[in-house]
Image: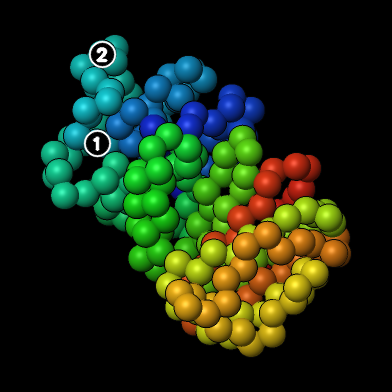
Amino acid sequence: MNALVVLAGEPPGEELLSWYFEESDFVVAADGGMKALLHLGVQPDLLVGDFDSFDPDSLDSPKFKVSRDSDQNSTDMEKALRSLMREEVPERIVFLGATGGRSDHFLNNLLVIAALPKEIEVILDSQDEFIRRVTPARAAKFTGILGQTISLFPQVDCEGVTTRGLEWELSDAEMGVGKILGQSNRAVSEQVEIRIESGSLLAITPKVGFREDSA
């Protein structure tokens, strides 16, 4: 199952949201993320949250499930994932509206996705940049990004980091706090591949005309 989770950070553009909406098998709106779907004129399969930024009572006879989760010890992303996992464990989760806005929200989102099962393909997409999680079970491949910047951000200590197609290549490297960091590398090939043996890192690239291929 391909899942889409729409959060209340920087709103996705209509074209981006429409494309992912059509590609997804199950769509979750997390609290204020519902506003972006309403603007597009589409409905999720599930709306979840404590509803401090969106009032579900404002909806006119919704044809989807509404789940109120008042747990103040979890974020909107955590609430959305908790409900999503009860439906089915997806093969891929795309997050829109997970970047931008408050930096504490964004950083918390990065911590939350680090804990997701390593077999799940995880993408954070926005108008300006594309972020993909890399795990031992999910390598990352990019096509058509010659000359573009790619930063590698270790979420935890990572071992066996190997890249192909970057200006400063890594081979069986260790990344993490006090170790190698990977800010502002550059693609010197039309195809870039990133693999790791343990840990979890994020491959971050500006969205300036590139294609992303699943590993």
Give the mark nearest the N terminus, 1 or 2: 1
Q: Determine the image quadrant of residue 102.
A: top left
- The answer to the question of whether label 1 and label 2 lie on touching residues, with beta carbons closer than 8 A, is no
Residue 118 pos. (x, y %): 45, 71
Judge left or right: residue 96 versus residue 68: right
Q: Name the residue nearer the viewer: 82 or 207.
A: 207
Q: Residue at x 63, y 76 (%)?
A: 195
Q: Is residue 65 visible?
A: no
**Relative to 172, does residue 134 appear above or below in the rendering?**
above
Q: Name the residue nearer the viewer: 141 or 148.
A: 148
Q: Residues within 10 Å of mark 1 (few under 14, many from 20)?
A: many
Whole-Å distance between the Cαs marked 1 and 2? Answer: 15 Å
Say which quadrant the C terminus sits in.
Answer: bottom right
- Residue where numbered disc 1 is placed: 49
Q: How is the image coloured?
A: rainbow
Q: Which mark is residue 61?
A: none
Q: Name the residue nearer the viewer: 137 or 42.
A: 137
Residue 17 pos. (x, y %): 56, 32
Q: Which mark is residue 58?
A: 2
Q: Residue at x 64, y 28 (%)?
A: 15
Callout 2: helix, strand or loop?
helix
**Relative to 81, does residue 134 appear above or below in the rendering?**
below
Residue 29 pos. (x, y %): 37, 34
Q: Residue at x 59, y 24 (%)?
A: 14
Residue 114 pos. (x, y %): 40, 64
Q: Amino acid at mark 1?
A: Gly
